[in-house]
């Protein structure tokens, strides 16, 4: 617990979360279809409707969580904290108000806190998916929050 950072190893098989707001679902499905040959070698999950539609339209197996407004964004956030999401493709619609906007912001925040790569548009998704790191392992360093809490407690004594 003395180390300042904790290292998370991303294996060759990536755990990829796929999330898309309603106005971006069609783009997500088309992107998945174009990249099917790469995606089929990785473990995919996503929020409710997005996961179901990708599976139906592309035959890619996508583990579905709840829809975003029903807690799916938070479920994916919890998986990030557990270390079981390696990166996220989250096509959000910046021109459409979302009733679950606090959940969206929480997901984006937790991805940054845990140094999880996140693509919010197709160009970034392409860069991630076609990166040299897709075929190898990668280590990302995350601040050791347990140590930070311990240090705070020590200062209060």
Image: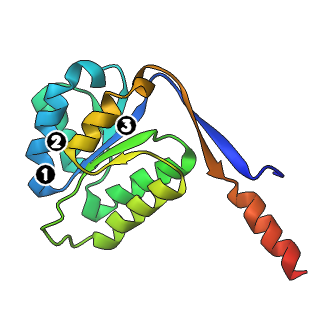
Image mark for residue 28: 2
Marking on residue 16:
3
- Name which quarter of the figure residue 50 lies in: top left
Q: CA distance from mark 1 to mark 3?
A: 17 Å
Identify residue for label 1: 24
Residue 101 locus on image (x, y percent)? 28, 71
Q: Any mark on residue 75, and which?
A: none
Q: Position of residue 45 (x, y in %)?
A: 33, 39
Could you tell me residue 73's position as x and y percent?
Answer: 35, 57
Element assignment for label 2 = helix
> Could you tell me residue 111's position as x and y percent?
45, 54
Q: Secondary structure at mark 1?
A: helix
Query: How far apart are the alpha carbons under marks 2 and 1?
Result: 6 Å
Instruction: Locate residue 130 relative to residue 152 in the image: left or right.
Output: left
- Mark 1, other Cα within 10 Å: few <14 / some 14–19 / many ≥20: some
71 with respect to 115 (left or right) = left
Q: Quadrant of residue 145?
A: bottom right
Q: Quadrant of the C terminus?
A: bottom right
Circle 3 packing at 10 Å, graded few (<14), some (14-19), many (20+), is many
């Amino acid at each position: 617990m003395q180390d300042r950072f904790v290292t998370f190893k991303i294996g060759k098989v990536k755990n990829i979360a796929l999330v898309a707001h309603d106005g971006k679902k069609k783009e997500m499905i088309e992107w998945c279809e174009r990249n099917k040959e790469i995606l089929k070698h990785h473990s995919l999950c996503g929020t409710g409707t997005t996961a179901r539609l990708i599976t139906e339209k592309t035959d890619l197996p996508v583990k579905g969580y709840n829809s975003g407004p029903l807690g799916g964004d938070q479920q994916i956030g919890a998986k990030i904290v557990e270390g079981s999401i390696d990166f996220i493709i989250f096509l959000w619609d910046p021109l459409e108000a979302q009733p679950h906007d606090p959940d969206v912001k929480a997901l984006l925040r937790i991805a940054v806190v845990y140094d999880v790569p996140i693509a919010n548009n197709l160009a970034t998704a392409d860069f991630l998916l076609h990166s040299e790191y897709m075929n190898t392992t990668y280590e990302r360093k995350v601040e050791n929050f347990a140590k930070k809490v311990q240090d705070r407690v020590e200062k209060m004594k």
